[in-house]
Image (spheres, grey):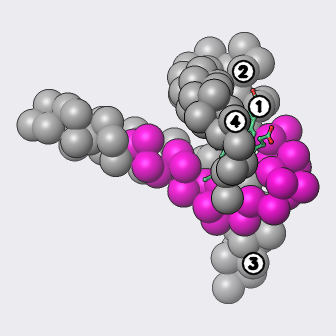
């Protein structure tokens, strides 16, 4: 689903901007976190399914867990799960509205 040509720099840029957005979202919320909301719409246009878009954040969490190994505490785990739920609520609002009804 990435570009076939010139994809590597775009992937690198996406990862770096996503990490900045996550740090801002989990911290001061000075503005970088808004990238998440706005990129949802540009990725709709690129044809990236929203579930896959959300999955990108979960992959980052999984990679960090692998790197941290035993240092990945229950607090860190809980904080990431909350973060991923909060991001999902932004990216998949319809799903959350439907969940709330049931
Ligand atoms: C697996 C999930 C994702 C896929 C398949 C995907 C795919 C793409 C594609 C096809 C482009 C257009 C590249 C081009 O032709 O110029 C792009 C650009 C971009 N994406 Fe994603 N994306 C994903 C997740 C994300 C996430 C989670 C974020 C951040 C919240 C993000 C941020 C961006 C940004 C900022 C650009 C513009 C990059 C630049 O040109 O500097 N993407 N993405």
Mark earlier in primary sequence (4, 2): 4
Q: Dot 2 lies on which element? A: loop
Could you tell me residue 89's position as x and y percent? 68, 55
Q: For mark 2, what is the residue?
A: 32
Label 3 near ligand 1 (CB < 8 Å): no
Q: Is residue 48 magenta?
A: yes
Q: For mark 1, what is the residue?
A: 35
Could you tell me residue 102's position as x and y percent? 67, 85
Q: Dot 4 lies on which element? A: loop
Judged by depth in the image, the label closer to the viewer, 3 or 2, is: 2
Q: For mark 4, what is the residue?
A: 6
Which residue sits furthest bottom? 102
Q: Quadrant of the N terminus?
A: bottom right
Q: Magenta segment range? A: 37-61
Judged by depth in the image, the label closer to the viewer, 4 or 1, is: 4
Prevailing secondary structure class for the magenta stretch in the rendered image: helix
Mark earlier in primary sequence (1, 3): 1
User: Can residue 89 be seen here?
Assistant: no
> How dense is the environment of label 2, judged by Cα within 10 Å: few (below 14), some, or many (20 and up)?
some
Q: Is residue 33 magenta?
A: no
Label 1 near ligand 1 (CB < 8 Å): yes
Disc 1 from disc 3: Cα separation: 25 Å
Could you tell me residue 20's position as x and y percent? 59, 21
Q: Which disc number belongs to residue 17?
A: none
Judged by depth in the image, the label closer to the viewer, 4 or 2, is: 4
Q: For mark 3, what is the residue?
A: 98
């Amino acid at each position: 689903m990435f570009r076939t040509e010139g994809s590597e720099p775009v992937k690198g840029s996406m990862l770096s901007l996503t990490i900045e957005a996550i740090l801002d979202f989990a911290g001061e919320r000075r503005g970088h976190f808004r990238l998440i909301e706005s990129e949802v719409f540009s990725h709709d246009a690129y044809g990236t399914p929203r579930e896959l878009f959300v999955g990108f954040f979960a992959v980052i969490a999984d990679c960090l867990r692998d790197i941290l190994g035993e240092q990945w505490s229950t607090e860190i785990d809980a904080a990431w799960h909350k973060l991923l739920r909060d991001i999902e609520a932004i990216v998949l609002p319809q799903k959350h509205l439907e969940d709330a009804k049931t």
